[in-house]
Image (tube, rainbow, N blue to C red):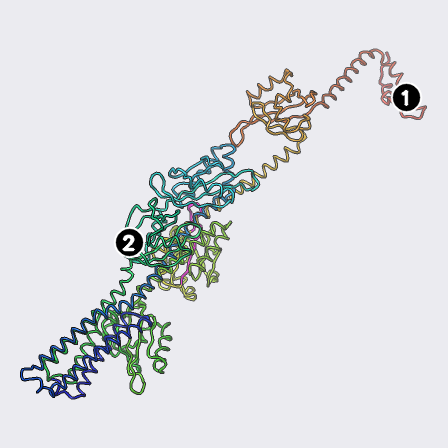
């Protein structure tokens, strides 16, 4: 058959087969891996297979060409076509046996990258989950810190311990319920410093010995202590946080008490752990810890339930990745088996502040799925190519006389189109002069959304995103200058419907003999889904970081303005927002910005925001959020009719979406937190839920600020009242005694101590009967009157320490203190001096009465004596002693 073929024809057939192999293998190489190192390794394997295959084919072609020269020696019965067919069949069998080896080689080269990618992804998942768990634990500790830092709350707990006041108990119970419900605690318990129960809200929980063991450290350090995951008697897992309640004066003899926050990890922690960022049939995250020489799983496992506490696994003699994780220091990746004995890839990371280790793992079979699929596809394509080549050889063998250059070229074109039109990746051949697509497949049309006629009339620059065009053109021109033979990059395309498509392109050039570029071959892979997933993970990470900073600000800040500033900064610095602002409405329903951060804060200097629905400026996101008390999401700022009054100003700052979240005080909206993002459709469903929760936390903090302000005002009023009372009590000249109806003395002012000649302790020890003269007949009547009417005023006789009796005026009243206990007040005034003066006056009056009686009928004689005394004094140069005698002389009637 081949003897009649010229050497040039054989060379052309060899070139056609070699070219077909190069195109097919290069396409497989581009499809199987984008890693240059792996591509280089596959190139080596591909080259070896190419040399072996083409050498065999060339040998058969040359031998077939020489067959007629040796035909005579072959014998009359020799059938050259049959022998040649057997030779071709033998070669095809040998090549077919090499197809599995080629697939295994592709798998071996690709598996290493898939394993590294799998370990990197698991490490990222472990880092994300560990950060979320640490943030969750920090929020719980922050709740405890906020409770311990509330001096008013601690003082009320002390008041309960001292007096057992029911009103204080009710207030503390309400405060604990306000902490339990918003933050989903199972229960909150309040104990005194001796660990005796005082109050409890939520589901009843028995304190474990492990939790009680945290009390001394919490009271000694004054810091919140977190326990470990335990299973209670009912079989439920729980985690306790011990909060020390220390008095405001750290020098106080003993703490006020202890608060225990009971958390069920099954409500938030376990769902957070067990969720996987992407779809995975075997992906799993779990927590473990080391207890002596054993390993304990802290949460239920995906493939085996009931393994969370107390089942244990020995550390020795085990190849589980969980065992390696708890025995290692720090974080890392690992390859081993899981609790089922199934080979897996894993990553582990310790949880800061705990003895927990988080392990993320995925089955090795799933991790290697991409390499396996690539190897299968490569083997399948190689097998298809082999079958096609075998079929072509069979056709050539059967037709004999039709193996000319045109047929070989047509066959080669058919093979090329077969691969070119496979619906796996977009492919195109472009002109270096016009940048137009000379040839492209249907997959590229599907990616870009154009018909073949429409796409054929365009060039690749017209569908490239303007922001990516310069970089693409620069790489294109480098190839034209001969600096490179191609380039690989990620860029954005604009579909016919205006949507953005993210693509990974691989461009190679074919050059003419003079070195100029003849044409470009490009492959385009749609990676929009992958980019969207990456953007979602990044956006959620920013939101979680913002929530963490917001919770820190709520715990740390002491006022609304400070909190508003911190929240705006967190949204910009951690949340990636271009701008964030907090607006508060005034009495006329007009909003004003009280805090803002980011680019374009001057935006609010020239706009007017209202909450009036009849005002165009009141129908925007901020006004609507405040007026209707709900979150408003504007996902397309430039085109949303709601944003019409502010569109021109907003366009200056490049905003794509806006979120307005109402801030409430006492359930009523007082303003809004507004977030401005450069990206349209920034706020998906999960982001909206997280941001709404953040706004609710801020509103709860505003309620706390209001309650704290009212409490401080009450404290100031009480302190002022106490100060006035203290000044009156200490500076009063009258003695003041405070006591009980049973006669005990509880307090006495300095005047009372001086009056009775006793110290305060002596007065308390003596009591009422020790200072009152119970022999005074007025005493029983005074006590009876006060018991009957609640007060008494009158005179009594009292005793000094030395036994001296003295008269006093007493004013006594019975009243109830703030704890509801009956108390007595007694104001005592010493009237000894007044009694002496009264006695002297009475004596003088008596003396006068006696003189008056003695002088009756002797007035003239007395007057004469007074005149004589005055006369005598006058002679002595002294003033008269009885000036009235001179007057009485003229008025005295003669007898």
854 w.r.t. 57: above or below: above
Residue marked by disc 2:
341
> Residue 542 in the image: x percent, y percent?
40, 58
Q: Under tag 2, what secondary structure?
A: loop
Between discs 2 and 1, the one toward the N terminus? 2
541 w.r.t. 408: above or below: above
In which quadrant is the N terminus drawn?
bottom left
Residue 291 lies left or right of residue 91; in this view the side is right
Q: Does 671 appear in magenta?
A: yes
The region drawn magenta spans: 663-677
Residue 777 lies left or right of residue 350; in this view the side is right
Q: CA separation, marks 2 and 1? A: 136 Å
Residue marked by disc 1:
870
Q: Nearer the viewer, residue 705 or 303?
A: 303
Residue farthest toward the left in the current orientation of the protein? 77
Q: Are marks 2 and 1 in contact (CB under 8 Å)?
A: no
Residue 783 lies left or right of residue 271; in this view the side is right
437 w.r.t. 181: above or below: below
Tell me the crowding category of disc 2: few under 14, some 14 to 19, or many 20 or more residues within 10 angstroms, Cα based.
few
Instruction: Tell me, yes or no, if residue 493 can be seen here.
Output: no
Instruction: Tell me, yes or no, if residue 309 can be seen here.
Output: yes
């Amino acid at each position: 058959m081949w003897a009649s073929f010229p050497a040039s024809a054989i060379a052309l057939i060899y070139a056609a087969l070699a070219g077909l192999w190069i195109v097919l293998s290069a396409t497989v190489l581009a499809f199987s891996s984008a890693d240059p190192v792996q591509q280089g390794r596959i190139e080596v394997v591909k080259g070896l297979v190419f040399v072996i295959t083409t050498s065999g084919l060339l040998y058969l072609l040359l031998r077939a060409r020489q067959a007629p020269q040796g035909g005579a020696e072959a014998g009359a019965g020799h059938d050259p076509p049959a022998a040649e067919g057997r030779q071709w069949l033998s070669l095809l069998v040998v090549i077919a046996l090499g197809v599995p080896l080629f697939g295994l080689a592709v798998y071996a080269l690709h598996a290493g990258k898939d394993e590294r990618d799998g370990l990197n992804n698991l490490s990222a998942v472990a880092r994300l989950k560990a950060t979320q768990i640490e943030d969750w634990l920090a929020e719980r500790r922050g709740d405890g810190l906020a409770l311990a830092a509330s001096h008013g709350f601690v003082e009320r707990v002390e008041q309960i311990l001292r007096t057992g006041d029911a009103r204080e108990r009710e207030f503390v119970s309400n405060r604990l319920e306000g902490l339990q419900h918003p933050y989903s605690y199972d229960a909150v318990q309040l104990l005194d410093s001796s660990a005796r129960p005082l109050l409890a809200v939520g589901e009843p929980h028995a304190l474990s010995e492990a939790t009680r063991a945290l009390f001394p450290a919490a009271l000694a350090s004054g810091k919140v202590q977190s326990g470990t995951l335990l299973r209670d008697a009912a079989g439920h897992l729980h985690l306790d946080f011990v909060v020390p309640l220390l008095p405001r004066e750290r020098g106080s003899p003993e703490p006020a008490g202890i608060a225990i926050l009971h958390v069920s990890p099954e409500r938030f922690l376990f769902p957070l752990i067990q969720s996987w960022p992407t779809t995975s049939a075997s992906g799993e995250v779990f927590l473990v810890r080391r207890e002596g020489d054993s390993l304990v799983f802290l949460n239920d496992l995906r493939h085996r339930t009931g393994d969370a506490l107390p089942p244990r696994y020995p550390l020795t003699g085990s190849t589980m990745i969980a065992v390696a994780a708890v025995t290692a220091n720090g974080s890392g990746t690992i390859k081993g088996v899981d609790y089922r004995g199934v080979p897996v890839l894993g990553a582990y990371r310790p949880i800061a502040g705990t003895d927990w280790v988080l392990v993320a793992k995925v089955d090795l079979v799933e991790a290697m799925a991409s390499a396996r699929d690539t190897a299968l596809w490569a083997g399948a394509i190689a097998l298809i190519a082999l079958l096609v080549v075998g079929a072509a050889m069979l056709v050539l063998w059967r037709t004999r006389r039709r193996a000319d250059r045109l047929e070989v070229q047509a066959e080669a074109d058919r093979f090329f189109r077969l691969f070119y039109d496979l619906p796996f990746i977009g492919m195109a051949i472009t002109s270096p002069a016009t940048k137009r697509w000379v040839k492209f497949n249907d997959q590229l049309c599907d990616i870009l959304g154009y018909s073949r006629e429409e796409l054929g009339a365009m060039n690749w620059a017209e569908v490239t995103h303007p922001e990516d065009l310069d970089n693409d053109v620069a790489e294109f021109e480098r190839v034209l200058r001969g600096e490179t033979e191609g380039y690989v990059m990620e860029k954005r395309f604009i579909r016919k419907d205006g949507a953005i498509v993210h693509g990974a392109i691989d461009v190679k050039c074919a050059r003419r003999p003079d070195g100029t570029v003849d044409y470009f071959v490009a492959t385009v892979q749609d990676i929009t889904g992958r980019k969207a997933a990456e953007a979602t993970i990044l956006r959620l990470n920013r939101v979680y970081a913002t929530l963490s900073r917001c919770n820190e600000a709520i715990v740390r800040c002491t006022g609304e303005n400070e909190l508003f500033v911190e929240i705006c900064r967190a949204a910009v610095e951690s949340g990636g927002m271009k701008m964030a602002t907090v607006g508060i409405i005034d009495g006329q329903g007009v909003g004003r910005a009280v805090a803002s951060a980011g680019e374009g804060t001057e935006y609010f200097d020239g706009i007017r925001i209202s909450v009036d629905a009849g005002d165009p400026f009141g129908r925007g996101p901020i006004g609507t959020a405040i007026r209707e008390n709900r979150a408003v999401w504007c996902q397309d700022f430039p085109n949303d009719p709601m944003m019409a009054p502010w569109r021109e100003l907003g366009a200056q700052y490049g905003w794509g979406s806006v979120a307005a979240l109402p801030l409430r005080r006492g359930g009523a909206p007082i303003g809004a937190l507004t977030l401005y993002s450069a990206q349209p459709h920034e706020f998906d469903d999960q982001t909206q839920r997280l941001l709404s929760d953040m706004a609710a936390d801020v509103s709860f903090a505003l309620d706390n600020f209001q309650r704290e302000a009212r409490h401080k005002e009450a404290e100031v009023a009480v302190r002022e009242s106490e100060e006035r009372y203290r000044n009156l009590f200490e500076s009063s000249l009258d003695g003041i005694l405070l006591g009980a109806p049973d006669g005990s003395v509880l307090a006495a002012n300095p005047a009372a101590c001086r009056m009775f000649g006793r110290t305060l302790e002596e007065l308390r020890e003596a009591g009422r009967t020790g200072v009152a003269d119970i022999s005074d007949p007025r005493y029983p009547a005074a006590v009876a009157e006060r018991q009957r009417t609640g007060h008494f005023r009158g005179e009594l006789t009292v005793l000094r320490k030395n036994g001296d009796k003295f008269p006093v005026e007493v004013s006594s009243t019975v009243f109830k203190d703030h704890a509801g206990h009956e108390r007595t007040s007694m104001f005592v005034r010493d009237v000894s001096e007044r009694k002496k003066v009264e006695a002297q006056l009475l004596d003088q009056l008596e003396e006068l009465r006696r003189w008056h009686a003695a002088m009756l009928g002797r007035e003239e004689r007395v007057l004469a004596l007074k005149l004589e005394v005055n006369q005598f004094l006058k002679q002595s140069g002294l003033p008269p002693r009885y000036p009235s005698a001179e007057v009485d002389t003229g008025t005295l009637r003669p007898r």
